[in-house]
Structure formats: structure tokens, C-alpha cells
Image: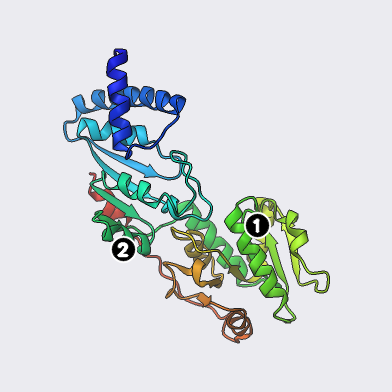
Amino acid sequence: MSLLERVKLAFRFSKFLGYQKLDFNTLRYKVLDIILWKKYLTSLKTKDEDLKVVIDLSYYSDEALVFACYELGIEMIGILHNMESLVHQQKSHLSGKVAPDWFFEEINLLKFFSSIYTISREEQWLLSLYGIKAHYLPYVPSENVISNCLAIKKLRQHSEKKYYLSIGTASNPPTVEGFKELIYIFEGLNLDEKLVIGGYDTEKMASFLSNKTKKVYLKGALSEKELEQVLVECKAIIIHQKPTTGALTKIPELLLSGIPVICNTSSARNYYYLNGVHVYKTGNELKKILKHPKLLAPFDFNLENKNKKFLDEFN
């Protein structure tokens, strides 16, 4: 491809993105990516005229692939983890804007897809408002994950329940903010209960703990065996998040494991009305849930599986 053709391609790509101000090196490498994608996709299309491309949409999705499909007239179907432009403090790697200021960058890109599948009912509704053909496809764990969950459930039938548990990665800013709020709320409840917080870097949150109470324990990173132990011994899982997007896939996994899930309204999105899920907005509401005599009672949870219908569309 000649230099002039590459310049024209760069211009079309810039227009495709809404004339984002990309630095020269970023634009140069994107053009190279587009050329390579076009070559590969063209070879596939010679074998299948009705070629469809399913793209896993995440923060690291390749706009060059989307643009290449668009220019070649190839239908695109997107599998959306969550709306990245609405994630707390998430930064656009194209414009440099911080969420939610680059919301329309993401919306404009998703409009080029023939359909989008979301794991969140809320995002399916939101995308539909912007004329995007969005479908709700709930998360379903793999067979291996389901097997592990059922094994945990069996072990819990005969275990002593010792504490409440919260798990997450403390190197993730939104997760840290949620942990800080949860620690503050839990220490103020004045209950004779313990909260164990486990996960990568959680041991570094010691400065958030009160010196007056010793009700919150930081476990740090958990091995596979340690994770199994805390899941078997915990009374329930507490999830406390800042407002964000997507759906917490660990909630159905925890319910399959027979573990009650207590979460604030921001965490409960998509799962409000499931058996085993208890939702709170305030510290007082959390206290009532923790003191409720039926909190630890067994519950039924049936996993809805719509994946087969989705996969049948491509067979």
C-alpha cells in the first residue's frame, strides 16, 4: 500500500472514530493493524461470503478490527462485558478523557455492530435507548466452575460458620473505595461479628482499620486451598461497590455454592430478586440483614441458561 493510500486510510479511520485527536505513533500503528486485519479478513471471506465476526468487547478491544470489518462490509456481533466509559475513573486510551466523559465515544463505536449481547439487563436497556440492537445474555459459569461450586456447597453442609467474608482485588481503585466504605460501615455496627477481607493486596489496607475495634481482618492474597476454606467457613459474602457497570458474575457462582450474598444496591444490579441475595442501602439496613434469623437458612437457586439459544444462531 502506497504512502498516499495509508494517509487516506488514516483519515477514514479518524473520521470513523469521530475525528479523535490521536498522536502520530498511535495512528501509524493503528493503520498497520487495519491493513493486517483487512488482509486476514479478506482471506476468510473468500472461503465464507456470509462471514460474521464476533468481537469480545472489553477495555482492550481493537478499534482497528472493528474498522476493518466496517470497511469490508462484514457483519459484527459484540459480546459486551460492561460499558467501559462508565467505570469509575476509567480513562479512554483514544481521547484520554475520564469516565463518564467519553460515554459517546463508546456508544458511537457500538452503533456499527449488528447486535450487542450484554450480561447486564441495565446495559441492554441503556443501549436500546440509543438505537443499538442489544440483547440480554446472562452469565452462565462453565461446567468446571459449576462443579467446583457444588463441591463447596456440599462441604458447607457440615462446616461451622465463623465470620462474614468479602473478597476482591485491592489494586483496583473502585474495589478499594468499596472496601473502605464497607470497613467504615461494618466497624460502626457494634455487632459481635467478624468480617474477613481476602484478595490480592488487601493486606495493604491496614490504614483503613480502626484502632478501637478488632472486627475486620485482612487476609491478603488467598491460595486456592485458602479460598476454598474461607468459602466453606463463611456465614455469608458481603459485596460493597461504588456505582459501576456490567454484572458481578461471582454472584451466581456464590449462590450455586450455597453462600448467601449480602450486597449494597450498586453491587446487586441485575441480581436484585434472586433467592439468597440480600440488598442494603444503609448501614442500618445491613445491620438488620446480619441480625435476621433466616439469613443463614438454606435457599434454592436455579441457574438460567440462555447460552444455547445464542450459540444456535451461529450453527
Quadrant for residue 2, please give it. Answer: top left
Residue at far bottom of view: 293
Name the image quarter holding the N terminus: top left
Of residue 304 and residue 97, the one placed in the foreground of this image is 97
Task: Give the structural element (helix, strand or loop) at label 1.
Answer: helix
Q: Is residue 37 left or right of residue 24?
A: left
Tell me the amino acid under the disc marked 1.
Answer: Leu
Of residue 1 and residue 240, the one placed in the foreground of this image is 1
* Label ID, residue 227: 1
Task: Give the structural element (helix, strand or loop) at label 2.
Answer: helix
Q: Is residue 246 left or right of residue 110?
A: right
Name which residue lies at 35% across and 64% down: 121
From what the image shows, is residue 133 above or below residue 303? above
Of residue 195 and residue 23, the one placed in the foreground of this image is 23
Q: Residue 202 placed where, x, y %?
A: 70, 56
Quadrant for residue 148, please give it. Answer: bottom right
Task: Provide the residue designation for mark 2.
Answer: 125
* First along the sequence among labels 1 and 2: 2
Regarding residue 142, the answer to whether it shows in the image is no
